[in-house]
Amino acid sequence: MGTPLSASTGAPHAAILGVGAYRPVRVVPNADVVDAIDSSDEWIQQRSGIKTRRWAGPEESVQMMSVEASRIALERAGLDAGQIDCVVVATVSHLLQTPAVATAIAHELGTDAAAFDISAACSGFCHGISMASDFVRAGSAQHVLVIGVERLTDILDLTDRGTAFIFADGAGAAVVGPSDTPGIGPVVWGSDGEQFDLIRQREDWRDVVGSPERPGSGVMPHLVMQGNPVFRWASFAMAKIGQQAIDRAGITLDDLDVFVPHQANMRIIDAMARSMKLPSHVRIARDVADQGNTSAASVPLALERMIAEGDARSGDTALLIAFGAGLSYAAQVVTVP
Ligand code: UT7
């Protein structure tokens, strides 16, 4: 005699119900980073489109920024923290290997929901949205809080020409919950581990700590990137992934209102829009110009800004796409809350 394993039943569909953001107070212009990397404002703007970025101060921790962004997302979704069943935090810059920062964030918000971190670098938020949609539809959770947060300045080498001017700090959050109509399309995701080394933590912890026979470096393991191969990969391969997400959502490019790509580099954003042949009516997120590249936080920050500035309106159809270390990527079409 078998024991029944009762099937959980979820909502017919899932949707993003609210989006929130936290941007660090300190605005850092190119002039403040160029001396340490022998660069210029002109070079940085030409190659990346970045004019300023936000860098966190001592009080603006991963947890603090996440809680602030989440409170706004919850308020906009019309929910209390107690109604959240699961908290998923996408980050690569929480400096404790364990426990997950998600449990501390959940506790500060006032929920004892399931809480865990995911490590998918810049594409982590889009991975989280896909998981949240599946949880809601499978009945594993009714409401899921997905947070993308980074305090990359903790792991930046400010003398590294390849990273110091690009990366930045911030947090974005989205509440995913039940919906009568589809609000989150099928995910198109994957990885290219052959390019594992292109963006990575330079030393592993054993190299930092060392041993009596082999002394460690004793310095924070920094983030390093071979920018140009990543640039070429992102500019060409990611346009196809975006198109696949549109196809899988059962829509055409003409149905799209908003494009929210990972905010890595303005030239990549433009190259993707060109390769995808986005119609001129599609409004494109360009948050990177004054926010820098905030990895897992970049897509929710950019989406939140478009909503706040009226460039993305409730009911609009938006393509989200993110890519980065791994190399890993994820894309989906969503309805703007
Ligand atoms: O978020 C995760 C995913 N990350 C990305 O998508 C980032 C992708 N990569 C990029 O955004 C670009 O590769 C960068 C903005 C990082 C660099 O732009 P690039 O057009 O790929 O430049 P490059 O590395 O090919 O360098 C071009 C030139 C070189 O000089 P030569 O050899 O042409 O004389 C570099 O030495 O620019 C020089 N250079 C710099 N000059 C001033 C490299 N870094 C700098 C710098 N300032 N910071």
Image: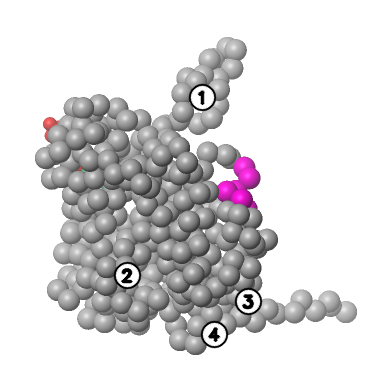
Q: Is label 1 in contact with label 3 (beta carbons under 8 Å)?
A: no
Task: Provide the secondary structure element on which disc 3 rests.
Answer: loop
Please state if 229 lies on the left or on the right of 14 as rendered: left
Residue 233 can be seen in this image: no
Image location of residue 19, percent across then percent down: 42, 67
Residue ID for mark 3: 139
Question: Which quarter holds ligand 1?
Answer: top left
Query: Is the N terminus in the top left, top right, bottom left or bottom right quadrant?
Result: bottom right
Q: What residue type is labelled 4?
A: Pro
Separation of marks 1 and 4 at Cα, in angstroms: 49 Å
Of residues 70 and 271, the one drawn nearer to the viewer in this rendering: 70
The residue that mark 4 highlights is: 12
The span from disc 3 to disc 4 (Cα, nearest Å) is 10 Å
Quarter placement of the C terminus: bottom left
Where is residue 33? Give x, y as percent: 24, 33
Residues marked 3 and 4 touching at CB (< 8 Å): no
Name the kind of residue labelled 3 in the image. Gly
- Mark 1 vs mark 4: which is more N-terminal? 4
- For residue 29, what is the image quadrant? top left
Which residue position holds label 1? 208
Magenta residues? Answer: 98-104
